[in-house]
Image (cartoon, rainbow, N blue to C red):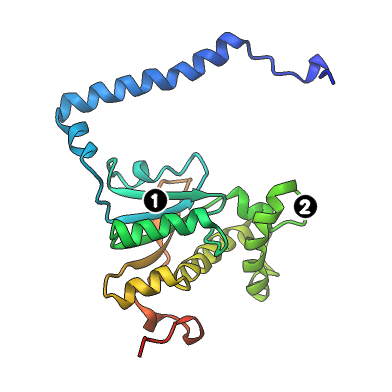
Amino acid sequence: MELDSQYLPTMSSNNVESSYLELIQGNKDWVQATLTTDPDFFERIAEGQSPRFLWIGCSDSRAPESLITNTLPGDIFVHRNIANLVVHTDINMLSVLQYAVEVLKVQHVIVCGHEGCGGVAAACSDKSYGLIDNWLRNIKDVYRLHHNELVNLSEENKVKRMVELNVVEQVFNLCKTTIIQDAWERGEGPHVHGWVYSLADGSIRDLEVTVRDKADLPKIYAFADEP
């Protein structure tokens, strides 16, 4: 089937290629600038990584974890997905979590959402978006849990509050995993935190829902200690 030419992009192939090559040039510029200030930087980070943080964030291009926290390559281990979800059937997320906790021995796991999250806004609506609806259902579950608080809010305030509530629920979803609880049992941490990043002013807000051990969990989720 041929597409009608009126629906095809108007950007020329030269412009497309030029925008792609900007990334390659950007890399060259970054390498040169880095070597100028720290000649041993790449040799040092090539030896291995020992990050103290695991970051579970949104895939949104406006919330790059290293930039907004002013950190360097090697400082933060990262998993990102639509609306920073912790889904217990997501083998990708669980594999990242296990490696970060059991191998890298991170001290902190941070769930960071952001204001104006498109995934959260979509989940708050009754529209169908196709395949992604299966993923957004996890956010709709959060909405159902907090329906009484959300139902009378304006659409803008509803989405803003849902961003926060979604982060809180993902923090507890992390702490429900055997990966986190087994680490606590071994006395290895980590502490689990929930943050929200503001696109409007660049600031991070700690939601103060830090969970440090099983004592901070509802009893139904805390696995019994081994006899």
Question: Mark 1 belongs to which amino acid?
Answer: Ser
In the rendered structure, find residue 127 and report the number of the disc placed on it. Answer: 2
Q: Residues within 10 Å of mark 2 (few under 14, many from 20)?
A: few
In the rendered structure, find residue 177 and report the number of the disc placed on it. Answer: none
Distance CA(mark 1)–CA(mark 2): 31 Å
Locate residue 160, reporting x and y percent. Answer: 57, 58
* Residue displayed at 71% across by 53% down: 133
Residue 199 vs 193, above or below: the answer is above
Residue 109 vs 220, above or below: the answer is above
Q: Is residue 116 left or right of residue 140?
A: left
Callout 2 secondary element: loop
Of all residues, the one furthest to the bottom in this rendering is 227
Q: Residues within 10 Å of mark 1 (few under 14, many from 20)?
A: few
In the rendered image, the quadrant that contains the C terminus is bottom left
In the rendered image, the quadrant that contains the N terminus is top right
Residue labelled with disc 1? 203
The nearer-to-camera label among 1 and 2 is 2
* Residue displayed at 62% across by 67% down: 142
**Residue placed most toward the observer, 35 or 91:** 91
Residue 154 vs 217, above or below: the answer is above
Residue 21 vs 41, above or below: the answer is above
